[in-house]
Amino acid sequence: MKLFIDGKVNRYYIQTLCMIFFPGAKFSEDEPDDGSADALRMTVRKEAEGIYARAELSSGGKSASGEKLVRFSRDKTEERVEKIACGVAIFKAGKALFGCTPPWGILTGVRPAKIAEELLADSGDIFKVRDTLCKEYFVNPKKAALLCDIVQNEAKLIGSLGKRTCSIYISIPFCPSRCAYCSFVSYSTKRLLSMIDDYMVQLCKDIDRIFAHIRAFGFETVTVYIGGGTPSILSPAQLSMLMDALNRNTDVSALREFTLEAGRPDTITAEKLRVAVDGGVTRISVNPQTLNDSVLEGIGRNHTVEDFFRAYNIARESGVKYINTDLIAGLPGESFSSFSRSVDQIIKLRPENITFHTFCVKKASDFLRNGTEMYSRNGGETGKSVDYSQVSAGLSGYIPYYIYRQKNTVGNFENVGYALPGCEGLYNVFMMEEVHTVFAAGAGSITKMVAPGRKAILRADMPKYPYEYLNAEKHDKAAADADRLIEEFCATHFPV
Ligand code: SF4
């Protein structure tokens, strides 16, 4: 897609706005305007009373335009005024060109709850927040109401946190096979899986290392999350080693939550879950994604619906306090009726948490070119599936408690966590809303330090791929850099 921008404006933001209507678009610079491709011609001007933006979108030989002047006001920074002006101009042009109204309006970020939270802090009135989301940000009223519910539910969970709390993330980037839609770094071939023993040795040393910082600066660890990949790919002995590393560093019984994202049902055994629960795990994810065997086969999940029910029963019998299950709306080959059957069956099981995701199309533009209804610009039946999951969960006593969005999801829809009241997955909220520091260990992990009041945020990352993580030189350099950053940040923001 070609961008022609007249005026000083954040180009990256303009690109993310274009992707509302052109999912998966790649942006070219410095190409002549020959009028042949998908294009945005944009003018942005600062005027005495506010910021004016005009957008003209072209695609398939047709064009449409939109414009907006947003006035300066005391409750908005100039950056916010500019974002709204550009967003509304592009939104109006896209709506006129394609005849569709994206559900999240001009909100493009991963964390839509943050905008609602800021609006609530300004006005203190949740009805006003809903109104502003609809009128200024063009968010569909249904989504605005969902966001307001989530912000209120999150506030209760966040409000209970002390100032010097933190969470831990442990990365296990290995899977038994690769799902067709996966965009994570996760090793799945036999040769790469043979690295796991060495990986665990290095990982446990890094767990000791991050806890040394936690003790030095007097943090209280409140949640631990073992994620992946597929953490339950570990053998009972490897899992036991991981539990030992955590138990020797912290009083696991004092944690508010300890999650093992088991994930793939084909890796779950009673013995592994016994080791996990004995080690202090209180929350396990068992993820079917769909209860439709032909769809599972199509996405390369390597397990069946029957495997899911077997694994779910093992998890229940393990005595773990909370079980989460993930479903994905909009998978290739899924229809509204097959997805809604999955939703009904999962709700019947009464897991404490259900996370409803929307399929993220890696190459959305290819799917759009194929022109299937599912991947049409407005998401086809996926919108109905997303609505069904949310309404059914609500009517069955579940409350929405966290939300995030990804680029290139079918129809621009969202991922929402639902819980039975009092059973919310805390790590998800604390991490997503950046309310406190998350110390991380393992390949591809990122320690994210958050100063009180979110006044400063700093990231320290470890090598992305397991083979780099196991390379002593690369690992030690990254660990030394992370140690230095953590110490400097904590000395400034958390002096002892
Ligand atoms: S289980 Fe998750 S991380 Fe593993 S291959 Fe599938 S999508 Fe990727």
Image (cartoon, rainbow, N blue to C red):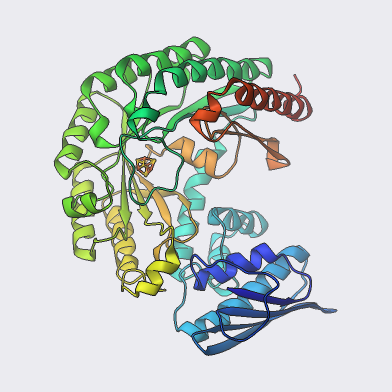
- Looking at the image, which residue sits at the far front? 191
Which quadrant of the structure image shows residue 63?
A: bottom right
The answer to whether any part of residue 169 appears in the image is: no
- The total number of labels drawn is 0
Q: Quadrant of the N terminus?
A: bottom right
- Looking at the image, which residue sits at the far top? 248
The answer to whether any part of residue 126 appears in the image is: yes
Nearest the viewer among 341 and 460 is 460
Seen at 24% across and 61% down, the residue is 333
Seen at 53% across and 65% down, the residue is 130
From the top left corner, tell me how far across and down residue 154 is, in percent: 50, 45
Residue 183, above or below 334: above
Nearest the viewer among 340 and 28 is 28
Residue 15, above or below 359: below
Q: Quadrant of the C terminus?
A: top right
Which quadrant of the structure image shows residue 220?
A: top right
Residue 155, above or below 95: above
From the top left corner, tell me how far across and down residue 362 is, in percent: 43, 57
From the top left corner, tell me how far across and down residue 67 is, in percent: 66, 84
Assign ligand 1 to one image quadrant.
top left
From the top left corner, tell me how far across and down residue 298 is, in percent: 24, 53
Nearest the viewer among 347 and 310 is 310
- Looking at the image, which residue sits at the far left? 306
Seen at 28% across and 62% down, the residue is 388
